[in-house]
Amino acid sequence: MCYSIPGRVVDIDGRTIIIDYFGEQRRAVNEIKNLRIGDYIYAQGGYVIDAVPAGEAEEVLALWKELFFELQERDQSLSGFTRPSGQTGDRLSRLLERIATGGAEVPEEDLLYFLNLEDEADIAALMQAANHLRHKHLGNSCCIHGILEFSNYCSQACGYCGISAHNKGANRYRMMPEEVVEAACRAINKYGFKALVLQSGEDPAYSIDDLCRIVSGIREREPALIFISCGEVGLNGLQRLYEAGARGLLMRFETGNPRLYEQLHPGRSLDSRLEHLRAAFDMGYLLITGGLIGLPGQTREDVLNDILLTRSLRAEMYSFGPFIPHPGTPLAGAHSPSALEIIKTLSVARIADARDAKIVITTSFETLAEDARRRGLSAGANSVMISLTPDTLRRDYTLYPDRAHSNESLEYQISDVLDLLSDLGRAPTDIGISHADSQLT
């Protein structure tokens, strides 16, 4: 559930509520006391964020109503499925038609067949089928999360990452906790973001107490869905952050192949990473997780297993992006994958989890390919992230070289995303009405 326009509560069953948006109904978890049927609320990522006075909600809905249906029609016109033309093989045509019209789970051997496609026309047909499934099951909503990268210090020595301890040439920065709270609240207040990711390296300068103060400091001032992304903070740390108000965890496992994982992360274990993810889900966290595509020694069977692992972890959002090694790391000489490999992965992720998955276009994919957002959203993805990191710091969060959007203002990023979503008929579900209604026409 990811609309951030006001919705009206039509049913309450314990902590679960049903919300109506112009006739569409969505389910969410409610933690607000004294909520009643007929009340208006904002919800994000499956959680009720805040109650909204009826007059304010009705004013916003009046602005959105006509646009809401216009965008739906535009998306529908762009996401229809047509039987693949003659350049595709009989097997591909038959499989895609069955997927687009049926509801049965797709066998693993067929998912691997899709990942092994090489012909661009075949891959275009795969994209179309995946996008059709996205529209069929999840409509035209596109989650837009803000991400605030508050420190690029990291104690870990991952073999490819530009903020790892390997990169002695990194220009390091660290925001004070009160600066993080102020930047997050400004994004909520000024720009209308309702879902924020707080990200850093594994920076020992921040204790769990510090991280909890940041989360609770934001939640005490502004309503928002807060994701944390600070690496492995320990199971007790996860529990304390949840109690402070965090409700989401962004932590990719990067590869489900233990051998590859150990090559990337000397001294770390895949089991520990998966233990964190599973424990976080059990605590009530929404998970954003996934893997890297194009790792040295990785096979397409590995990629498929990573998609299936993400599904088994019951992730709220799939995050799959290309392996892009930083020149200041041991894997500097390794090669990145082609954009088509990422497109196939996103498409197969959508087909593997057609009804539920939110799939994000990663900044790494946008760094690899200039048109990544448009191509990814046309291949079944339905989420993007916008950097909220202060302009003076953003260019130093160098996970990989020439990182996309490093030199763009927040205002430009928002405008650019909204223009693209308007083109594709997608409704933005995290940016406030004051920004969206002026551009999505």
Image (cartoon, helix red, strand yellow):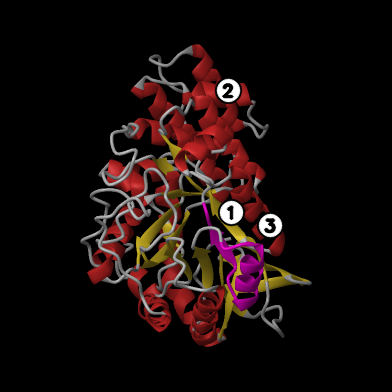
Image quarter hosting the C terminus: bottom left
Toward which corner of the image does residue 406 lie, by quadrant?
A: bottom left
Q: Residue at x 35, y 47 (%)?
A: 364
Q: Which residue is mark 2?
A: 110
Which is more foreground, mark 1 or mark 3? 3
* In the image, residue 245 lies in the stretch drawn in magenta: yes
Q: Which residue is mark 3?
A: 279
Q: Residue at x 79, y 72 (%)?
A: 14
Toward which corner of the image does residue 22 lie, by quadrant?
A: bottom right
* In the image, residue 182 lies in the stretch drawn in magenta: no
Between the residue at mark 1 and the residue at mark 3, the CA separation in whole angstroms equals 15 Å
Q: Describe the element under mark 1 as helix, strand or loop.
A: loop
Q: Contact (CB < 8 A) between labels 1 and 2?
A: no
Q: Which residue is mark 1?
A: 316
Q: Residue at x 55, y 58 (%)?
A: 232
Disc marking residue 103: none
